[in-house]
Image: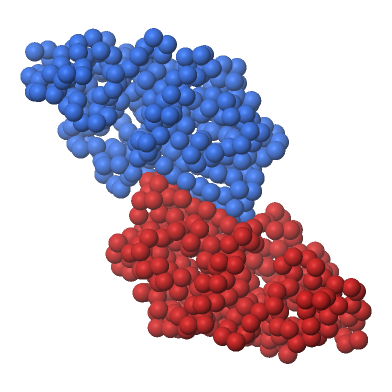
Chain colours: A blue, B red
Amino acid sequence: MPINHRIVLDNRPQGEATVNNFKMVELPLPDLKDGEVLVCHHFMSLDPYMRGRMNESKSYAVPQPLGEVMIGGTVGEVVDSRHPKFKAGDQVVGMGGWQEYSVVDANVIGALRKVDTTHVPLSHYLGAVGMPGVTAWYGLVKIINPKAGETVTVSAASGAVGSAYGALAKARGCRVVGIAGGKDKCDYVVNELGFDACIDYKEHKDYLSLSKALREACPNGIDGHFENVGGMVLDAVMLRTNAFARIAVCGMIAGYDGAPLPMANPALILVNRMKIEGFIVSEHMEIWPEALQELGTLVGTGKLRPRESVAQGLAAAPEAFLGLLKGKNFGKQLVKLI
Amino acid sequence: MPINHRIVLDNRPQGEATVNNFKMVELPLPDLKDGEVLVCHHFMSLDPYMRGRMNESKSYAVPQPLGEVMIGGTVGEVVDSRHPKFKAGDQVVGMGGWQEYSVVDANVIGALRKVDTTHVPLSHYLGAVGMPGVTAWYGLVKIINPKAGETVTVSAASGAVGSAYGALAKARGCRVVGIAGGKDKCDYVVNELGFDACIDYKEHKDYLSLSKALREACPNGIDGHFENVGGMVLDAVMLRTNAFARIAVCGMIAGYDGAPLPMANPALILVNRMKIEGFIVSEHMEIWPEALQELGTLVGTGKLRPRESVAQGLAAAPEAFLGLLKGKNFGKQLVKLI
């Protein structure tokens, strides 16, 4: 059998996560049992939610166990199969984790899904036509539920979730304004993703300054916001919300390291009769087919052209992951494994 | 014609409101025009929302104009009428403001409503069977929407909104835990209002300490919360919320004076997939008949026995209002005018 390399969580972060929290291990692949499928991973996905799972403390998910392979989405090719629905050569998406191969019990519903790469490149099933895209869809469609003509905003606009959100909002006739870090990302958000405007939060020293920039970019106020970050961006957006604004909370990346991250002015929830709702897309599996259908069409027709940051080889994963948490990636962060 | 005394807003508060923001004026009552009704006020209502209107700044309502009579709910008796649906002696509820008499255009829908005092004392139409009661109903039924067996909490539990909330939640089979200021109020909340427990926030120096007390009072966590206050109470409650908790935000009294009032840990919105929603009951007139029906029955059958703090005479209104903002009242704060 071939040797499988994997990255496990070796110890939990004390404050900021570091590469020393991870450890590479190697082990032989076991023989397949009935119903199992061996998948060779082509790409693995790096996502901010993984940082939350590295903590012992209460989070929205079970903590990542120490010594176990890091959780994560993967796309790849079936190498061997003892399940009637899969055969060698099938292209599949699953939750294979930070490793080169995975053995999957294909009888578990949703564990492994065949995908069609005729119009959509394989890697996009980890991004625009995968969990991040569906995340954008749920927040926009199910929480914000915008009407044509409304103004909606999103933080981390150049990322996997933000770029899908922009395309979905434009398809609904909204004015879409992004918030991103740096001129390059903002140019990309406007010129390639088709947002109406994008604000570089790094040009603003506090939320009041950022809020002023939002007032110019959103002359009719903000009706809906998708929060990937929290902190200063959320505070600034809240100051510009209209009555009955809806905020979908998907990420609070700046708070994962345990530093307090207060909301500056929660009284605005009352003043503007806002609705703020947190969600995790994996708890809403019933909407995935509809969302994936729309996202696949947007990518297939060129209306959504997501960008990817690709790290090379499993050993590069921890560094790439830490960079993602600091916004060093540009678009969907992937690791290419073969 | 009789002389009418009224209290107007003389100038806007700089920080904390004071009695010097108000001025008593007197003026003769005008002759009635066609469709108008002259009402002699028996009671007027004092409510925290009035503080928000005293500011010039953006609030959820139009600011109270300077020199005009302070807005407010009133109950009283018709003295004279040039409207076919009202006659002298009718008992009515309306928005007569801080004055002894009001002249009401009874053709305006909702401006004046006749009430039946057979089973419900007149003053309760300003409290449990009026705006505060309907406020509790909307937050509980339309936002929190609890299932039997769930645990729900409310701040300012001994007040007009809190007491109605408790009765409505018990009627739905919930465990109800109040938060109030002082032993007397907490005893009343448990012994007379029938809450399962009540916590005295004054015994706690910070939100972590208050949160510990909530853990004991809510062994199964908190599924729904009605926020009348904001600040430390909201922070403490959020720490104890279960997944998918709902928070109805009705008041942020501690923030009206302009002091910053941050939310300590908004990341919990995501961690617990919470929904937080602000509302103003006057924007949901469609639910008033259903809510008033249930509240009237609860009062009529003795299941809701609201308490009142009654100040005597119009001149006492400013002092009583400032006391209300500091929690000096015990139950619904009224001013008796005759």
Quarter-wise, where is residue A160 in the image? top left
Q: Could you tell me residue A294's position as x and y percent? A: 47, 24
Q: Quadrant of the N terminus of chain B?
A: bottom right
Q: Quadrant of the C terminus of chain B?
A: bottom right
A236 lies above or below A178: below
B117 lies above or below B20: below
Left or right: where B318 falls relative to B202: right
A280 lies above or below A103: below
Residue drawn 40% across and 75% down? B195
Residue drawn 35% across and 54% down? B242
Residue drawn 63% across and 82% down? B116
Residue drawn 37% across and 46% down? B271
Q: Residue furthest front?
A: B84
Observer-nearest residue: A165 or B10? Answer: A165
Q: Is residue A93 visible?
A: yes
Q: Could you tell me residue B332's position as x and y percent? A: 58, 78
Quarter-wise, where is residue B170 in the image? bottom left
Observer-nearest residue: B8 or A67? Answer: B8
A163 lies above or below B194: above
Left or right: where B111 falls relative to A210: right
Left or right: where B217 falls relative to B64: left
- The number of numbered badges drawn on the structure is 0
Observer-nearest residue: B103 or B296? Answer: B296
Q: Could you tell me residue B146's position as x and y percent? A: 41, 60
Q: Could you tell me residue A162's position as x and y percent? A: 50, 28
Q: Is residue B235 visible?
A: no
